[in-house]
Image (cartoon, rainbow, N blue to C red):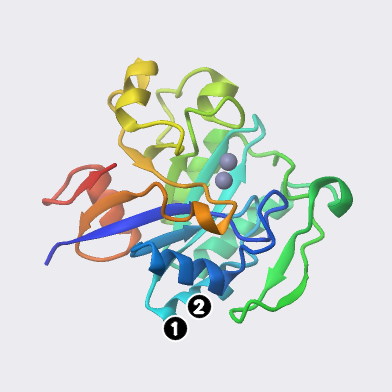
Amino acid sequence: MLATLKADLHVHTCLSPCADDEMKPLAIVKQARRKGVDLIGICDHNSAANVAAARRAGSREGLAVLAGIEVSSEEEVHVLALFDTEEDLQEMQRLIDRNLSGENNPELFGEQHLCNEFDEIIGQDARLLIAATRLTVEEVVENIHRLRGLAIASHIDRESFSILSQLGFVPERLAIDALEVSPLCTVALARQRFPQTRDYPFVCSSDAHRLDDIGETTTTFTIAGACIEELRKALRCEDGRTTAG
Ligand SMILES: [Zn+2]
Ligand SMILES: [Zn+2]
């Protein structure tokens, strides 16, 4: 049976150096529930280290949490990678780790807190998470698909770190599953401003870096369950599945 689910597929935790310290797993889950969100994706920059804690918090509070990461490609294009399982996400993480260099300087870039599901800080991620990987955007998308994930080009309307700001266009051969608009834009406006994107499926997400941002912009999916295959079908308008921004 199909049901409508309100999804915010792009939420950062306090692991991202640019996110507020209040963005701890349980606090995020509770805020999403308060905002009437049914499904979130945890997508920190180049690290999945807080995903397991967020999923444990989600299962306790009754919120579906997809295992995700926001990958920075070599061209500094941000791509959301969403998976059903933490095993597939960890495989993606290993690939990223082999292609990411440098150590974080917290005073310069911000803290990168590792948390448990009770919102206790249990350590710091030492990697330079804001750096670009050595993976091209094509390699990023190919590997997401190899691992059964969904690949979404982040905040295409933004003037930095988006596929349009970095490449100027969406390469035709790129098998991207959807384009995302930030809270500063709408799907209709994006299609008007960037005519090349007219035929792509779109999602709207908050790209939350603060608790107040969560659920401010969402996509409503009409699907049979909160899993990647259902989201993929909805983006392709298959079997009665649909999306609305
Ligand atoms: Zn981004
Ligand atoms: Zn982001």
Q: Is residue 33 left or right of residue 222?
A: right
Could you say whether the residue bearing mark 2 is in a helix, strand or loop? helix
Q: Residue at x 52, y 66 (%)?
A: 28
Distance from disc 2 to disc 1, alpha carbons, whole Å, reads 5 Å
Question: Which labelled disc corresponds to residue 113?
Answer: none
Residue type highlighted by circle 1 = Arg
- Relative to 70, say whether 116 is above or below: below
Residue 20 in which image quadrant: bottom right
Q: Is residue 75 above or below residue 24?
A: above
At numbered mark 1, what does the secondary structure look like: helix, strand or loop?
helix
Q: Position of residue 75 (x, y in %)?
A: 64, 29
Indicate whether 57 appears above or below 4.
below
Q: Is mark 1 within 8 Å of ligand 2?
A: no
* Mark 1 lies on residue: 60
What quarter of the picture does the N terminus occupy? bottom left
The residue that appears at 14% across and 62% down in the rendered structure is: 2
The reply to whether the C-beta atoms of the residues labelled 2 and 1 are less than 8 Å apart is yes
User: From this viewpoint, is residue 177 visible?
Assistant: no
Residue 3: image quadrant is bottom left
Q: Amino acid at mark 2?
A: Ala
Tell whether 39 sits left or right of 57: left
At x 39% / y 72%, what residue is drawn? 63
Label 2: how many Cα within 10 Å (few below 14, some 14–19, many 20+): many
Indicate the quadrant of ligand 1 in the picture.
top right
Find disc 2 in the rendering and name its residue: 57
- 26 above or below 240? below
